[in-house]
Every structure is written in structure tokens, then in C-alpha cells.
Amino acid sequence: MATVKYQVFVSSTYTDLKEERWEALMCLLSMDMIVSGMELFPASNMEQFEYIKRVIDDCDYYLLILGGRYGSVPEGGAASFTEMEFEYARQTGKPIIALLHDKPETLPEEKRERDPALAEKFKTFRKSVSNDRLVAFWQGKEDIAKKLAPAIHQILRDQPGLGWVRGNGGATTGVADERKQIQLRPFFFEKTIPLDFLCRGENEQIQSKLADVFCCIAPDLKDWTNEGRISELLCRKFFGNADKDIWQVQIIRHSLNMVLLTFLAHGLIVDTNRSSDRRPMGKQYRLTEEGMRKSMELLLQ
């Protein structure tokens, strides 16, 4: 029988909740979920939001993590992108899990809204989120997985989603006929990802296509590869010919995490935490069969 995977859209403000998002994403991946979210392609205009709605449509569940920020509001708009995502999920009947900070007024100033108008919108939004749905409260990043895991188990029991199966998974009868087949969107590899590096004490950001990032690391990931080697490959890719000593360049941790998470979430790589092939040298990564196939397709283009 084919294995069913459920897809979760993770929504939040970004800069103030990077660590909390990471904890949530790692928790979901450990539960064998497919993770979607807009940290790679942040909403910047209404045209982009139309794409976000299609991504939410494809998901089985919607997860909102709310701290103390309301989020960016598009020009001429009345609501933040985070609130618009939530409202779209609510209006389309998507099962929702909400993780709210227990006391947002105690957060550091940089993690709260300073603009009085936005602060008022945040209060109204938070109250709306709390009404008539599964809500859990957190105080620190270490609480995220503790609150999220039981909420996922409960929503799977009470509101089972349609789920996804592999295209060759053999699901041919009953409800399985309606399940979606896992596949990457055709333009996935054409999307750009911001990568932050530290070069001689100064921050530099590179915008790169996912295809270029994947092709950079894929040849080494035919066998188990550690994070240090992956970091080195990315530094050499973008700064190997620059007027800099390559050993004075390092990729910022959150950028490395986002690269790995993106390819983990889309089934292109696997880590030793999710493989029966345990390695003694800490967490390592390797291409999946799908990752191997995609890397060959890209390298032959």
C-alpha cells in the first residue's frame, strides 16, 4: 500500500520568527510531512500572493505561528500578507493549527510592532485567530515542537486530509484514487533563494536559482556528505573566483538551514535522522532516488 504524506503550509512573519519556524519545520519533517511556506519566495506584491494561494490550495493543513509582529502590508492593502494567508486558509475551509506566543507584550522591542496602527491590527488579528480553532501557546522556541506534535496528531485524527502519494506508489482504489501525486512544480528550480555569507567580517547576500544551488551540491551528495562539506561547496560556488581567501568566507547558518530544509521538504535529499543508515560522524545528507533523477536532468540541460 502506498505511503500517504500530508502537506502543511507554514505561515508566520519571517525575520522575528526564523528560529521558531525552523523548529516547526524540523518537527514536521520528523513526522514525515511535506512542508510548504513562503520563506524562500516571500510575498512582496499581490501577484505573488496569487501564487501563495495556489500553494495553500495544494496543502492539507495550514499552520500559523504568531509572535508579536503583524507583518508587512502590501501597498494600498489593508491587511498583512500573514493575515491574508490566514484568511484565505480559513475561507477555503483549510484545517488550521495556530501557535500563538503566550505573552507577546513581553517580547523584545524588535520583535513587537512599534507602529501604533500596526500594533492595533496585530491585536485584532490575534483575537480573530484565537476564535473557534485549535490553538496552542508558546513562550520560547523550545516550546514549538512540544506544542506542534500533539496538535498535528489531533488534527490528523479529527480532520484527516487527502494527502499525497508517490506517482508510482500503487494507490489505485477507493479514496487513494483521489489522492494527489507528489511532484515538483515545473518552475520550482527556477525560483531564487537569498543566501547570506560572511566575508571577512562583512555580510554579503547572493541571489541564486534553486537549480544552481542544487547542481552545486548534488554531485557530492551521491554519498553521505556532512554540513561542513556542503557549506564549503556553496562558498566555492559563489566566491571561488572572487578576490577573497575562500577560507575567510562562510555561509550564515540560517541560509544553510534553508537550503537543506528546502531540498529535504521536497524529497530531493534525506538526512541521517530520517534514514536507517546511521552514520557516526553527526548529521549527514544524501540524494534520494528522486534527487538523483532531478540532478541528472538539470546537469544534462
Image (cartoon, rainbow, N blue to C red):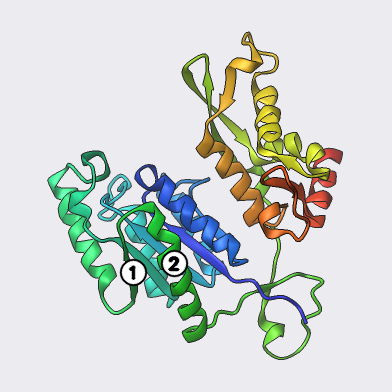
Q: Quadrant of the N terminus?
A: bottom right
Give the residue drawn at x 85%, y 45%: 296
Relative image position of residue 147 (x, y in whole percent): 40, 67
Residue 250 lies in quadrant: top right
> Is residue 105 found left or right of 80 in the rendered image?
left
- Mark 2 belongs to which amino acid? Leu
Relative image position of residue 294 (x, y in whole percent): 79, 49
Q: Count the marks: how many?
A: 2
Label 1 packing within 10 angstroms: few (<14), some (14-19), many (20+): many
The residue under label 2 is 148
Relative image position of residue 104 (x, y in whole percent): 22, 54
* Comes first in the chain, label 2 or label 1: 1
- Residue at disc 1, secondary structure: strand
Residue 108 lies in quadrant: top left
Residue 190: which numbered mark, if any?
none
- Residue at disc 2, secondary structure: helix
Residue 173 lies in quadrant: bottom right
Q: Nearer the viewer, residue 292 or 221?
A: 221
- Mark 1 belongs to which amino acid? Ala
Furthest residue toward top: 243
Relative image position of residue 36 (x, y in whole percent): 54, 58
Give the residue drawn at x 34%, y 53%: 140
Give the residue drawn at x 21%, y 57%: 103
The answer to whether one can see residue 172 in this image is yes
Label 2 packing within 10 angstroms: few (<14), some (14-19), many (20+): many
The residue under label 1 is 136
Q: What is the C-alpha distance between the residues marked 2 and 1?
A: 8 Å
Give the residue drawn at x 70%, y 53%: 272
The reply to whether discs 2 and 1 touch (Cβ–Cβ < 8 Å) is: yes
Furthest residue toward bottom: 174
Q: Quadrant of the C terminus?
A: top right
Where 85 sits versus 61, above or below? above
